[in-house]
Amino acid sequence: MQLMFVFPSIRMCGSLLLVLCVSACSAVPGTGRQRLDLMPDRQMSQLGQETFSQILVDRTVLESGEEVDRVREIGERVIVSARTLYPGAPIPKDWEIVVFQDDTPNAFAVPGGRIGVHTGMIRVAESDDALAVVIGHEVAHVLAEHAGERMSQAVLIGGGIMIGDAATRNEDGTTRTAVLLAMGLGTQVGLALPYSRLHESEADELGLLIAANAGYDPRTSIGLWQRMEEEGGTRLEFLSTHPNPGSRIKELQAVMPEARRLYLRAKARQRDAQGPSAD
Ligand SMILES: [Zn+2]
């Protein structure tokens, strides 16, 4: 069985490499970085939807209440901001933002516009501004199509062939685990996360700008990451690839002038919209 599987994989790799020569890269909105892009958007979105549906079955969802309202409102503003800031970006039309009853400070996103926020993340965020930075980070993962890039890399390596080929048909445990890992949802299956530090830095940068452009104070991000560090743990999405919180904060500070400019502009827009009586 194993050998029969390897042979078509090699053939498929050859085909994929041909495709790679023609049109396998696309630019990440905002940063302009060329990313490997072998996975069709529709397939990624479908995989995201299937993955998220399973998570909804497996976990405790908070259906209503103050935390749900807050997350939804912030999410809507952040998504509008992402569309405004990156009009050409592949941003899904419909989003689903779900709050999970889980005290672990974590959040995640899957392709197609589905975001999960733990109640523990809301607790550690403390403010709407910092929560917007978290949601901005997740929206940035989606619009930069990081999961698709991870899966494309896996396809090129060869072993990942089965991910793209079988994921929609074959629901055995190995495939499911591979899909979850490629989507950056390692915590869901209790495995170490193969997150790319590059993807995390990119999501930090884009997410900060998106949140700031929505009128949320980007300076809250510094305290947020410090509190996240204090929470500890190595299996959190937000800490997995940043063993050194100092370098993360340094990177955020490099983007801060641009984020501040967007934030002040958004606040001025809000004041204008409220009229001259507002202070
Ligand atoms: Zn991330």
Image (cartoon, rainbow, N blue to C red):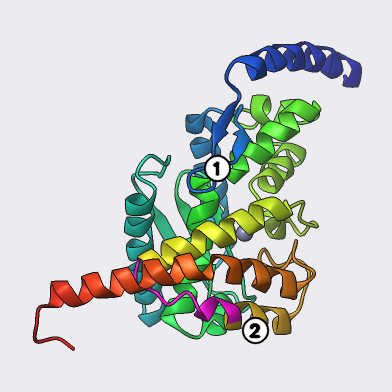
Q: Secondary structure at mark 2?
A: helix
Corner quadrant of residue 201:
bottom right
Q: Magenta stretch: give its range.
A: 214-222
Residue 57, visible in the rendered structure: no
The front one of 194 and 260 is 260
Corner quadrant of residue 4:
top right
Q: Secondary structure at mark 1?
A: loop
- Give the main secondary structure, helix, strand or loop, of the magenta stretch: loop
Q: Is residue 220 above or below residue 88?
A: below
The front one of 141 and 106 is 141
Amino acid at circle 1: Glu
Q: Please tell me whether residue 219 belongs to the stretch shown in magenta.
A: yes
Corner quadrant of residue 223:
bottom right
**Residue at the disc numbered 1:** 145
**Residue at the disc numbered 2:** 227
Q: Residue at x 71, y 16 (%)?
A: 17
Q: Position of residue 112 (x, y in %)?
A: 46, 44
